[in-house]
Image (tube, grey):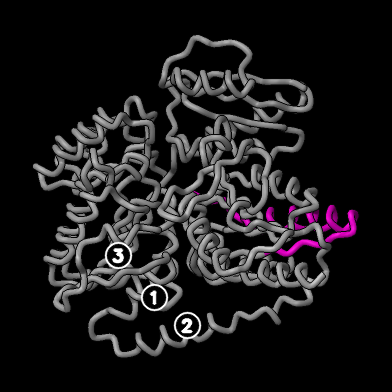
Amino acid sequence: MKIHQQLFPNYYRDSVALMQLSAKIAQYEGVIAASAQMATAANIQLLLDTKLLDKSIEAKPNDLLVIIQADNSEIATNASIYMKSLLDENKVTQQGGISRCQAHSITMGIEMLPTANLALISTPGDFAGAEALKALKQGLNVMIFSDNVPLEQEIMLKQYAQKQNLLVMGPDCGTAIIQGVPLAFANSVKRGDIGVIGASGTGIQQVTCLIDQLGFGISHAIGTGGRDLSEEVGGITMLSALKLLENDPATKLIVLISKPPAQSVARKLVLAAQSINKPVVINFLGADTSLEPDLSKSTNNITWANTLESAAHLAVSLLPNTSQNTSLILNSAAQRKLISQSMFADKVKSLVDTQINIRALYTGGTFCYEAQILLFDHLLNIKETDLSSNLDNCYSNTPIKLTNKSFKKLDNVWQSSGHSIIDLGDDDFTRGKAHPMIDPSTRNERLLQEAHDPSTAIILLDLVLGYGAHENPALSLVATIKQARDIAKMAGRSLIFVGFICGTQSDPQNYQTQESLLEEAGVILAGSNAHAIEIAATIFKLINQNNKEL
């Protein structure tokens, strides 16, 4: 094995571009692992921790460090040449024979685009706050894609922006759609009347995609960053975004999405939403309803949703002056009720008696969170048998902590136990590697591991499309599913795959193309994450009954 290391002085690239670069190099034949990162002290330490570096190096934060681990030195050298060609591809673009250079500062960017009103910050977290402040002081709204920005900087930036009537999306804001333009990890959706504000990237993606699939559209989708609804930050961005969408004539209805906010922040948000003259759908995933303000008054304009799917459906059904909405949603609900055990009886019969567990392998963190809530509710309704202490058998690498709903932390995140709901985008799995939405190798490896486990019955999967995501995620996944089926077959077992696609027909990967590939591979496809959990729980109930009869 050979490790090739190369440093490019003053060669800055943003984190999305570097994740995509790492993923492409990793696909080069003979390459075992690849990492392209800015040479900050934190990133160098990360590479040391993951053994991709054997000793520290002298470098500046604006230097690009590329490390390639390959079968031999020849492959490492060739992969390095390939990597350099990828770097040079986007260095200068040609338009009409005129070279256009990239802006090297916010001031230079404003000179090139004087009408711009938004800056997207994607630098190492140590420097993101300073760059965001520069943008704010020049009158720009800011989207901070970067993570690892200190909390005190986030609070300072958002308080400053609030005074200037500007907006700070983030830090760690991975998704937004502004005036129809997708930013970072977002989907190509129809323009329309529904505004979305979310503290969750994949939550925003799920809701906006489902609205698009129902034939409706999005005015804006504003991300806040995951800490915005904490006690410390106080929901500054969500409150500011709510005010912006209230005054936006293109927005007729607003959807709020997040994991449970701090209690005081939830109350502020609800009171602010009640004061506006537009319908508001709120989905605080898994929130304790006893902590919500009294919403029993008939004068309020708020409707509560308990899943991302229901948030999208309610938003469409509550749009003012749209007569077709009610029948559309009722028809959709009727289709959902068609799920029955008889649909999956033959698949369950092909399992053996050791196969009793659900293994969910998510690339989207909010999907993992929602899955834990919903699966726990379903298991509450299934009588326990000797083969599975259902409620004591639920694990995750990112367990939820909710009233009467608690998954347990896996002792070893690299090894599933019982019903395991895994967020493969968590830091444990992305240190030194690209996010699994970009590089599917981490999930592919874990999927094969689950196939070797004699207790695995159902494998649950998400597939996220859109800008920034892998160019053809279904193709890679289908090849791995075939390998997994072969592994199980050799052991005299079979596997049941349940999945859903978060995307639209207009996405670069094309929803229908991805759907066809998965269906041909025998994946049971659901319309949403909530729907997929319902299917998986229905199949598990049938497994439970069959084993009880035995």
Q: Give the camera-side residue of 176 and 27.
A: 176
Name the residue carrying label 1: 313
Which one is in front, 326 or 508? 326
Residue neighbourhood size for the residue with mark 3, other residues' Cα within 10 Å, grouped as few (<14), some (14–19), many (≥20):
many
Whether the magenta-drawn stretch holds residue 492 is answered as yes
Tell me whether the residue at label 2 lies in contact with that at label 1, contact meaning CB atoms closer than 8 angstroms: yes
| Residue 45 in the figure: left or right of residue 78 | left
> In the image, which residues are magenta?
468-497
For mark 3, give the secondary structure: strand
Residue at image position (73%, 59%) is 387
At a point 80% along the width and 48% down the height, the residue shown is 452
Residue 480 x %, y %: 74, 53
Q: Is residue 296 above or below residue 261?
A: below
Mark closer to the observer (3, 2): 3
- Tell me the crowding category of disc 2: few under 14, some 14 to 19, or many 20 or more residues within 10 angstroms, Cα based: few
Q: Position of residue 264 (x, y in %)?
A: 21, 49
Q: Describe residue 365's horizontal placement relative to residue 197 as left or right.
A: right
Residue 407, horizontal then vertical, whole percent: 53, 49
Q: Nearer the viewer, residue 99 or 524?
A: 524
Q: Which residue is mark 3?
A: 282
Asked whether residue 212 is drawn in magenta, I would say no
How far apart are labels 2 and 1 at the CA level?
Answer: 9 Å
Give the quarter of the image for residue 534.
bottom right
Our reading of the magenta stretch's main secondary structure is helix
* SS assignment at label 1: helix
Query: What's under tag 1, amino acid-wise?
Result: His
Q: Is residue 418 above or below residue 321?
A: above
Q: Which mark is residue 332?
A: 2
